[in-house]
Image: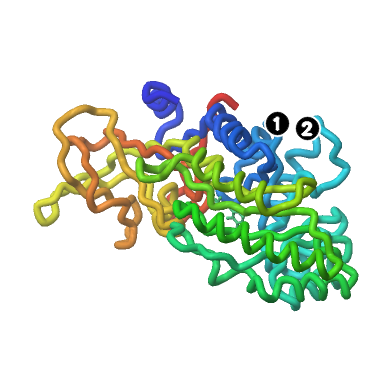
Amino acid sequence: MTKTQLQTLTRQHGTPLVVIDHDLLRRNYAEFRKHLPQVQAYYAVKANPAPEIVRTFYQAGASFDVASLPEFMTVYENIRHLPAQAQQDFIWDKIIYANPTKPKGTLQSLDQYKPLVTFDNLGELEKIQRFAPHAGVVVRLRVPNTGSMVELSSKFGCDPGEAVDLIVAAHKLGLVVEGISFHVGSQCTNFENFVQSLNMAAAVMNESRTRGHEIKILDIGGGFPAPYDAHVKPFSQLARKINAEINRLFPKGIQIIAEPGRFLVATAAMSVARIIGKARRDGKRCYYIDDSVYHTFSGIIFDHCQYHLKAFKKGKQEICAVFGQTCDGLDVISLSEELPDLEVDDLVYAENIGAYSNASATWFNGFPPAKVVHLNE
Ligand SMILES: *Cc1c(COP(=O)(O)O)cnc(C)c1O
């Protein structure tokens, strides 16, 4: 997607605008597969649940990680009409339900699909046995999330020391533990988290085998970092580490899956907003734009992600603040951007804004979420 294309689309569709380039989605998916050829990618739909994205990834060969019944149905409804790529009488080949805690009603609705679902405690297992007895289960381990932008280990995962007991307990309840999963934390730039987690998963798998329960699926979760800035080491480097550990630690026949969200979509979208007001406060130039942290920039709050704004216009840059359109003091997009002298109606854009952005936009203050346009679909 070029800047000229972005400007043309903005003239057509107005602002605020999010443009998702499907060529970039396909490129990210291909890069993931190229560097981790033994790993099937289950796109984590919550990063950006647009049905158009689901269809593009499905056609590229991806499977899906969902975390709610509506997400499950979004995937199911969008892929069941499309031509099947391979043998897939089993929903597991295409969908994993990876939210360890599920309401009873969701389990009841999912049971007819014989889903693959995760769990991390005994109470959840008992609930699954009662309300989704046809489910296959995957135990989620708590693993180190050190240095990840979004940390998940305080909310999810059983202690590795409890995992084998849970596997045995599942068996007693008549459920089969098909896999072991973990999540190293989102935007994980500390690659040692993956190394340690793979070692923990291998230890659980080996102990489980000695107690008579062979585990078939290794799910290495999400967390693969998007290249937001030059400090993020290349994906190929992470992949080399993961491949080396997998080859060293796990038996050959095992099925390996991952749940990349951010990595597949972050770099595939840009957003455009319009300057709607301008002020000088305490000597600093301030711009107000027609988007906000309650809308496309919601990742600033929910995802701990910082986005940089750029202008199409050239000119001498000056440090400035950029505020959102809502009447809330929290709605600060940045207190230090470098932008040229812009006027009301000039445009600014943000790159790498495809993950956890419009997905968590609200209607706060009466402002609708940005229009989303799909390019090269
Ligand atoms: C959110 C989530 C993902 C995706 O994480 P990314 O960091 O975006 O790759 C994968 N698996 C589970 C269980 C999740 O909750």
Q: Amino acid at mark 1?
A: Gln
User: Residue 249, percent across and down?
Assistant: 67, 54
Dot 2: within a 10 Å radius of its alpha carbon, few (fewer than 14), some, or many (20 or more) residues?
few
On screen, residue 87 versus residue 229, left or right, reads right
Identified at 61% across, 33% down, the residue is 34
For the N terminus, the image quarter is: top left
Residue at image position (44%, 57%) is 149
Foreground residue, 36 or 371?
A: 36
**Residue 147 placement (x, y as % from top left):** 43, 60
In the depicted structure, whether residue 196 falls above or below residue 246: below
Q: Quadrant of ligand 1?
A: bottom right
Q: Which mark is residue 202?
A: none
177, above or below 189, in the image? below
Residue position marked by numbered label 2 in the rendering: 82
Under circle 2, the secondary element is: loop
Q: In the rendered image of this protein, does residue 187 appear above or below residue 53?
A: below
Front residue of this view, candidates 64 and 294: 64
Q: Residue at x 53, y 43 (%)?
A: 263
Q: CA distance from mark 1 to mark 2?
A: 8 Å
Instruction: Point out the image quarter for the C terminus.
Output: top right
Local secondary structure at mark 1: helix
Image-based side of 244 in relation to 271, left or right:
right
Residue sitting at the far front: 248
> Measuring 38% from the left and 36% from the top, which residue is drawn there?
272
Look at label 2 and name its amino acid: Leu
Do residues under tags 1 and 2 come within 8 Å of each other at their CB atoms?
A: yes
Mark 1 crowd level (few <14, some 14–19, many ≥20, 10 Å Cα):
some
Marker disc for residue 59: 1
Q: Position of residue 174 (x, y in %)?
A: 90, 70
126 versus 118 height, above or below:
below
